[in-house]
Image (cartoon, rainbow, N blue to C red):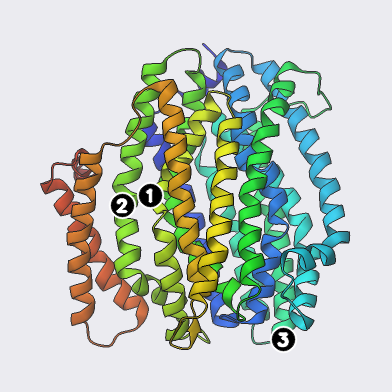
Amino acid sequence: MSRAIERVGEESPARSARWVAAGILLSRLAGLVRERVFAAYFANSLFADALKTSLRLPNFLQNLLGEGTLSASFIPVYAELLEAGREEEAGRVAGAIFALLAAIAGGLSLLGIFLAPVMVDVFAPGFEGLQRDLTVTCTRIIFPMTGFLVLSAWALGILNSHRRFFVSYVAPVVWNAAIIAALILFGGRVDLTRLVVATAWGAFLGGVLQFAIQLPLVIRLERDLKIRWGTRLEGVRTTIRNAGPAIAGRGVVQLSGYVDVFLASWLVAGSVAALTYAQTLYLLPISLFGMSVAAAELPELSRRRGGEIDVMRQRVNAGLRRIAFLVVPSFVGYLVLGDVVVAALYQTGDFGPGDTLLVYLVLAAYAIGLLASTGTRLFSSTFFALQDTRTPAKVAALRVAISAAGGLGLMLVFRQIEVAGRSLGPVGLALAAGVGAWIEWGVLRRSLGSRLGEIGAGADVVGRMLAAAALAAVVGRAVDWLLPPVPPLVAAVLVLGPYALTYFAFAHIFGLAEAAAYLRGLAARLRR
């Protein structure tokens, strides 16, 4: 029996996903606190645009070489070596990949520092004066941070392959904490220009800490780790070969984000910030319910790549049902109750009701593609387990092209519309992203079905979930209308609590097995 199996043991996919979700939940909650503090100081201003853009520009390095690429290329190879009992070889491969990533990330970080003005001019050409200068300064500070986040993703790959999910996904809490600390420490003591720069330094320190807190567990689990150059190792060559298409796919996805920034930079000030505020909420269920299942399933699917097609199909379909059960109410909730959510999180300080309305409308537009985006995460993990990184990359390119073209057209239409004095240009960009997400989902599902057989959560099952969520949304909206004037955070608790409980009640009435499983788990915990 391999050392990894002896040490960790086999975990159920649901239990593994819960560990991932728990870590992601804590990190996302920290992220929401960060955004609330950020909004209180910067709202939808040029200072917000500068820092949000400077965080996004160097983010391409993290995404090209980080978790997405390593999940596609490194984890399947490393997990297979562990399953086969080849621990010493696995340690050599892990060390060689670390050395390669450190060299590439370090070189690109230095290059990014020198090319920051060029990147800002290319990706945010609408920025001028102080807005541009601040973006350049913050980009130079933040760029080296992404090198440490790439190494943090390498640590995540090691820990996930050993079925240790929690630490790697909770690690971003320290990154968020560092930013929050910078805002609280310097907020009110310096002007907004200096506060933006101080926050950028907080982000850099947080990136270093995020990598550092994972190292002790990595060293303890991977006792054969040898960090040295070793591109001739078969596992390293396979990882590099699979990484090529994965990097191309991640690059295309990053291009989509830069296109949004590029287009939004031509809109009124605050448009970039409005997009990113909405994206924070949009990505929350994707991370909690899509990425958690996909991340937990990837090592297990990789271990079954040798021919257990029926088992792989069953795992994928079961995963899709688990994802849909929690994403469907998220989708309906954002559409019907999104204003309550946005107000609870952001409406404070200079962030007023008009800002809340704009971000809510952007969020509702993004939500159209929410179910597709979460399912796509699991589809991509399945392709990665099959060591096919080309198909997801090609389909991602198609989605980006459609979203970019549609985003330009819809942005031009919606920018002519104003609500509460806010131009709705960002709403057009979000709508196009939602349409592109569904196209990507459909193409990947059909391609994966040709290999594994019928793929999906089942139309009847999803229909019952939608019905339960719609009825719950009626209850939630009614509660909101009946409430007297209360602070936004209190309103959210009083509205979203009944919404969630009503959804679970109707899901149970409609015979959804997932609802019964959650209720059994809750009853067992109460008995203990």
Q: Is residue 228 left or right of residue 355?
A: right
Residue located farthest toward the left when viewing the structure as drawn: 509
What type is the residue that disc 3 sits on? Val
Viewer-closest of 219 and 307: 307
Above/below status of 214 relative to 198: above
Residue 162's quadrant in the figure?
A: top right
Question: Which residue is disc 3 drawn over?
Answer: 190
**In the rendered structure, which disc, 1 or 3, sits on the residue that comes first in sequence?**
3
Q: Which residue is found at the position 34% from the left and 83% from the top? A: 487
Residue 354's quadrant in the figure?
A: bottom left
Instruction: Quote the CA–CA distance across marks 1 and 3.
Output: 43 Å
| Label 2 Cα crowd, 10 Å radius (few <14 / some 14-19 / many 20+) | many
Q: Secondary structure at mark 1?
A: helix
Question: Which residue is disc 1 drawn over?
Answer: 371
Instruction: Quote the CA–CA distance across marks 3 and 2.
Output: 44 Å
Q: Which residue is found at the position 25% from the left and 73% from the top? A: 494
Q: Position of residue 9 (x, y in %)?
A: 45, 23
Asked if the residue under mark 1 is in contact with the one under mark 2, i.e. CB atoms within 8 Å, the reply is: yes
Above/below status of 258 relative to 341: above
Q: Position of residue 391 (x, y in %)?
A: 56, 32
Q: Position of residue 76 (x, y in %)?
A: 58, 25
Q: Is residue 107 left or right of residue 485?
A: right
Name the quadrant of the C terminus.
top left
Residue located farthest toward the right when viewing the structure as drawn: 114
Question: Which residue is disc 2 drawn over?
Answer: 328
